[in-house]
Structures are given as structure tokens and as C-alpha cells.
Image: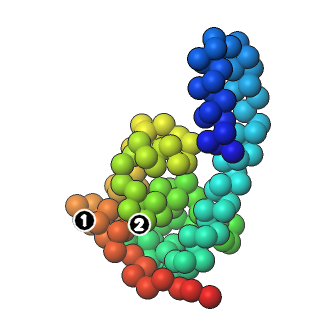
Amino acid sequence: RLSKFEVLVKRKIKVGQVNDLLNTASSSRLSEEDAATFMNSFDTAFLDLYPSFVTEFNALLREDGQIVPPHKGRLTTELRIYALIRLGVKESSEIAALLFYTPRTIYNYRSTIKSRARNRETFESDVEQLCRVIHAE
């Protein structure tokens, strides 16, 4: 859906239909729906592969800085960012594009979480080493 929308945007820009494009983009309900669907699917798939991720991630944080997801089987934004880092997506701009945020917002989340780490210097490389065993059904 997102790639189709990208094609639509490019086509409308080329033919000068900027007002029509603004109207389409203003009805952000579709993109919010797509984002929510993506987040739910991502959370489910990631936690199916790495069911111990949240526990292992929290072990890297000080006790007063741990993250508890509000719902079982779901990740918070912070956990999604570090789930992507665990998967090898390290650039804030790439994470931002995947999670529908600005790179600055991702940078701020990363800085905030890193400040709660037991070892700030190795925190992100430690995250990359989490859940070394993939669980398959």
C-alpha cells in the first residue's frame, strides 16, 4: 500500500496536481491505519522469533529504567527501535522511515534509552547480540 501511495505521489507531482495530492495526504486516516497494521504485524513477527527480547533488553537497562509493554505481544516505540537495531537496521533515518517518525525523533528516543543503560558505551552493540537463538514453531 505504501509503495502504491508513493507511485501516486510521484505521478501527481509530475502532472502538477499538488492540491489534489494535499487533499489525499491530508486524509491521513489511511496512513495511520497502515502504520498501525504494520506495527502490529512487526510486533507479532518479531516476538514470535525472539520471545525473550523484552526480558533480555531490560537486563541491559538499570532497574529504574526498564520498559514494560502495555499489552502482551506488543512492543513500545522504544522497543521497536531497538528491535530494528537487533535486526541490523542501525541508521536513525532508516528506522524513522520504517516507524513513521522523523530521524530526530528516533535519535531522541535512542538517547533517552541509552541514558538508562547499565553500560552506555556498549549498549547498542549489546542489543545487537540479544536473542542469539531464534525460536521456531
Q: Which mark is residue 86?
A: 2
For the point 51% across and 61% down, the residue is 79
Identify the image quadrant of the N terminus.
top right
The residue depicted at 65 percent of the width and 20 percent of the height is 12
Q: Is 109 in front, or is 61? A: 109
Seen from the viewer's position, the closer of residues 136 and 124 is 136
Could you say which disc has been placed on residue 50 in the image?
A: none
| Mark found first going from the N terminus, 2 or 1 | 2
Identify the residue at image location x=68%, y=13%.
Answer: 17
Element under label 1? loop
Q: Residues within 10 Å of mark 2 (few under 14, many from 20)?
A: some
* Viewer-proximal residue among 20 and 118: 20
Quarter occupied by residue 22: top right
Q: Amino acid at mark 2?
A: Arg
Determine if residue 82 is in view: no
Residue 68 placed where, x, y %?
Answer: 57, 67
Mark linked to residue 122: 1
Which quadrant: the C terminus?
A: bottom right
Q: Where residue 61 sits: x, y (%)?
A: 39, 68
Residue 128 location (% of width, % of height):
35, 69
User: Extreme left residue here?
Assistant: 121
Tell me the colour scheme of the image.
Answer: rainbow
Q: Is residue 38 above or below residue 73?
A: above
